[in-house]
Image (tube, rainbow, N blue to C red):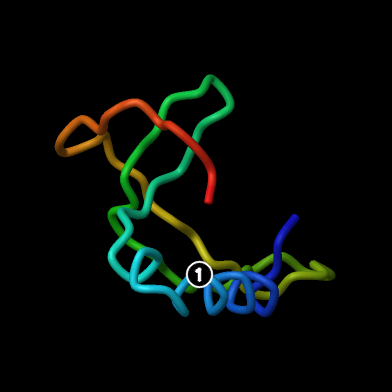
Amino acid sequence: MLDGKTFRQMLDKFLISPAGQNARVQIQLPNGQHMDIKEISLLENRLLGARETNRLVLVAQAQSTPMGKIIGKL
């Protein structure tokens, strides 16, 4: 599980380089399929006694244009 603070720290590291600043943002599903991020929302939980009172939700959509084969991890 990833919290907002850790997510921000990781994102800041990627955004240092121009490659990261201009990179397409996608999610890889457990079946290996890649989807584009459409929206990010901050939502409030209404459950009593929940440890997490809020959540960041990334909404995905099918790829708008197909990407080429991944050749490496930077």
Q: Is residue 67 left or right of residue 25?
A: left
Q: Amino acid at mark 1?
A: Phe
Q: Where residue 71 appears, x then y in whole percent? A: 43, 32
Give the structural element (helix, strand or loop) at label 1.
Answer: helix
Q: Is residue 27 above or below residue 34?
A: below
Q: Where residue 21 appears, x then y in whole percent? A: 34, 71
Please name the residue shown 36% across and 54% down the image: 25
Q: Is residue 37 above or below residue 34?
A: below
Furthest-top residue in this view: 31
Please name the residue shown 34% across and 26% down the image: 69
Q: Nearer the viewer, residue 7 or 54?
A: 7
Please name the residue shown 24% across and 36% down the image: 63
Q: Tell me the quarter of the picture where residue 22 sits.
A: bottom left
Q: Nearer the viewer, residue 45 or 25?
A: 25
Quarter that holds the N terminus: bottom right
Furthest-left residue in this view: 65
Q: Tell me the quarter of the picture where residue 23 sits.
A: bottom left
Q: Is residue 4 left or right of residue 69?
A: right
Q: Determine which residue is flagged by label 1.
A: 14
Q: Nearer the viewer, residue 12 or 39?
A: 12
Q: Nearer the viewer, residue 26 or 44?
A: 26
Q: Is residue 27 left or right of residue 30?
A: left
Q: Where residue 2 appears, x then y in whole percent? A: 71, 61
